[in-house]
Image: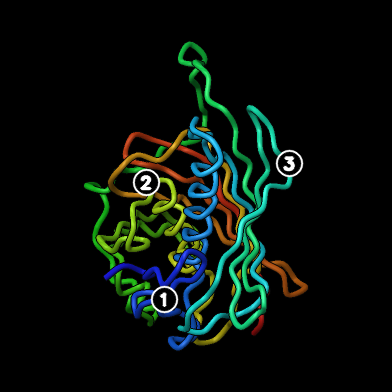
């Protein structure tokens, strides 16, 4: 069973694997964001044959979404031969619930220039398994395998993977990886979710390299400010090293 099952060209049905962490009768937004990355790529491949890669996805989360069928649509905001800006929207009952904007950027040979000073983290074989269900309920969390090294409240590294397909149709490794990113906000909590609510209202990920197969790593720091705002910042890794960065703006509610 995938996270989503295709009903028609613009409609999908969420399965119990998408069950949320804040409320189990709502969808966890992580698979929904992965789905939007997928439909951006499907639209791209219907329009062009060069596989223009997704280099950034920025999502605004406009509200909660129940475990009910949703529709999606895609539009090109800035067409181009080597750079495109594409917008994808997920809706329920005629109401937009997530809007994603993705920059697609052509590849080129920069092998001679490869470099990143982003710090590496211990590999998944060096980190102990962790039961994320001890902190969070829901079908999505239950569908993942997590390894964690916690340094302090709000600071640590996790590796995550799942054997659940994003959707019951062919999709890319990038879309599947994007579908795991939103888990970052709950893996190294600064405060217990039983005492403080801190949902994220957005998610932005930049990639300088496409994530490879296997585990996805998140080197995460959570910060709370004095006025009800927070930020979860992560460096994103695959098993070969850093691939990009991730940020999530939080509304903090004691």
Of marks 3 and 1, which one's residue comes earlier in the chain? 1
Helix, strand or loop at disc 3? strand
Residue located beneath label 1 in the image: 14
Residue 132: name its quadrant.
Answer: bottom left
Residue farthest along the left direction in this orientation: 125
State if disc 2 and disc 1 touch (CB < 8 Å).
no
Mark 1: give few (<14), some (14-19) or many (20+) Cα within 10 Å. many
Q: Residue furthest top?
A: 112
Give how far apart the Cα atoms at labels 3 and 2 are: 25 Å
CB atoms at circles 3 and 2 under 8 Å apart?
A: no
Question: Which one is closest to the eye, mark 3 or mark 2?
Answer: 3
Q: Quadrant of the C terminus?
A: bottom right
Query: Dot 3 corresponds to which residue?
Result: 78
Q: Residues within 10 Å of mark 3 (few under 14, many from 20)?
A: few
Residue nearest the observer in this picture, 64 or 248: 64
From this view, report whether residue 229 is shown above or below residue 235: below
Q: Compared to 127, does 185 lie above or below?
A: below
């Amino acid at each position: 069973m995938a996270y989503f099952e295709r009903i028609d060209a613009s409609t999908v049905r969420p399965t119990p694997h998408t069950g949320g962490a804040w409320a189990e009768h709502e969808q966890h937004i992580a698979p929904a964001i992965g789905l939007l990355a997928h439909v951006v790529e499907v639209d791209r491949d219907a329009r062009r044959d060069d596989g223009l890669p997704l280099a950034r996805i920025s999502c605004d989360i406009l509200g909660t979404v129940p475990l009910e069928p949703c529709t999606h649509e895609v539009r090109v905001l800035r067409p181009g031969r080597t750079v495109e800006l594409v917008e994808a929207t997920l809706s329920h009952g005629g109401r937009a619930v997530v809007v994603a904007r993705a920059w697609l950027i052509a590849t080129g040979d920069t092998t001679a220039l490869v470099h990143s000073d982003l710090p590496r983290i211990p590999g998944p074989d060096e980190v102990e398994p962790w039961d994320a269900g001890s902190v969070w309920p829901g079908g999505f969390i239950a569908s993942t395998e997590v390894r964690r090294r916690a340094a302090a409240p709000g600071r640590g590294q996790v590796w995550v993977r799942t054997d659940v397909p994003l959707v019951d149709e062919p999709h890319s490794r990038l879309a599947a990886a994007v579908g795991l990113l939103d888990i970052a906000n709950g893996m190294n909590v600064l405060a217990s979710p039983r005492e403080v609510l801190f949902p994220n209202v957005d998610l932005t990920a930049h990639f300088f390299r496409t994530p490879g197969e296997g585990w996805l790593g998140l080197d995460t720091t959570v910060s709370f400010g004095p006025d009800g705002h927070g930020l979860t910042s992560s460096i994103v890794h695959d098993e070969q090293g850093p691939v990009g960065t991730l940020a999530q703006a939080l509304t903090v509610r004691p």
